[in-house]
Image (spheres, rainbow, N blue to C red):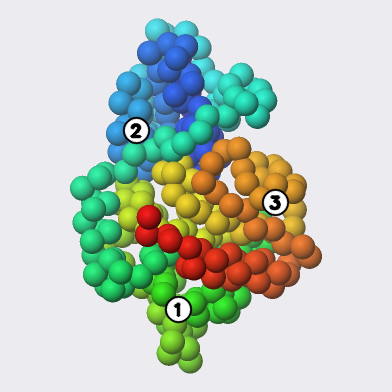
Amino acid sequence: ILVWAEQGIGDEIMFASMLSDLLEMGDNIIVECDARLIPLLQRSFPKIQFLPRQVPPDPQLVDTNIDYQIPMGNLGQWLRFNKDSFTAGNYLLPCSKRVLQLKGKYRSLSNDKLLIGISWKSINRDIGKTKSTLLEDWTSVLSQDGCYFINLQYGDTKSEIEEYVSDKKHILIYQDKEINPLTDLDGFAAQVSALDLVISTSNTTVHLAGALGQNVWTLLRLVPSWRWMTQRTDTLWYPKMRLFRQQQLGNWSHVFDEVKQALENYIASDWKQ
């Protein structure tokens, strides 16, 4: 069976949740996907052969021994036919050694504060603008005591962060120069797994955090992608994800009011357990 990935990295990560179900139907599966995902996916699904998407395609992908082929997203038609068919728990496995190293590093830097990764925008050319926020929107959240905020935003954000914090001496956003989310997704997965909580707009980061089984709060525009449905505060795709929704088109103020309150409650809870 040949499964070929489609759409973006976030979609590939989400649809990969169905690969375990597919394995129950047969053990000779080849998946074509973004090359950056292969180390993470191969560790998580050792019985599946992963090949990079490239032009021209890998010769194994045009082998006459392949009996069936399907786009990865179409697996949902056969494997996610009702809400009870969704499987619970994480399905991606980060490098445990790298997770421990990063967790120790961040615990030391933060003096054992709550480790929160943040990401505030999407670079999707079609809908990224409506899914994105400004760092200024985050001030009430980033001002919370007892938290250590780590930048998970992919792309070059150095000048953006420097400009934002220039007049906010009480706010720190740590940038780990050893991690590049755009080129090293396996390292990025370890970074996300080293944190206590991820707060992000809807982008690749939330899919990765959800697939890793992390606590993740996703901030949604008024009319979000089909996967998030329309009213739920949770999602069938990722059991440990919580959704915060816009109440008015383009207005994030209500979302951040809710996130601030939720974070205050989270800090007050025994989160270290």
Give how far apart the Cα atoms at labels 2 and 3 are: 29 Å
Label 1: state its secondary structure: loop
Q: In the image, which is nearer the foreground, mark 2 or mark 1?
A: 1
Q: In the image, which is nearer the foreground, mark 3 or mark 1?
A: 1
Which of disc 1 and disc 3 is earlier in sequence? 1
Q: Is residue 93 above or below residue 123?
A: above
Q: Is residue 145 left or right of residue 123?
A: left
Label 2: state its secondary structure: helix
Q: Position of residue 273 (x, y in %)?
A: 38, 55
Task: Identify which residue, 60 or 167, lies in the foreground.
Answer: 167
Quarter holding the N terminus is: top left
Type of the residue with mark 3 = Pro
Which of disc 3 and disc 2 is earlier in sequence? 2
Type of the residue with mark 2 = Ser
Q: Which residue is mark 2?
A: 44
Q: Position of residue 34 (x, y in %)?
A: 42, 39
Which dot marks residue 224?
Answer: 3
Type of the residue with mark 1 = Asp
**Residue pictured at 34% horizontal, 39% vertical:** 93
Q: Which residue is mark 1?
A: 145
Q: Position of residue 190 (x, y in %)?
A: 32, 51
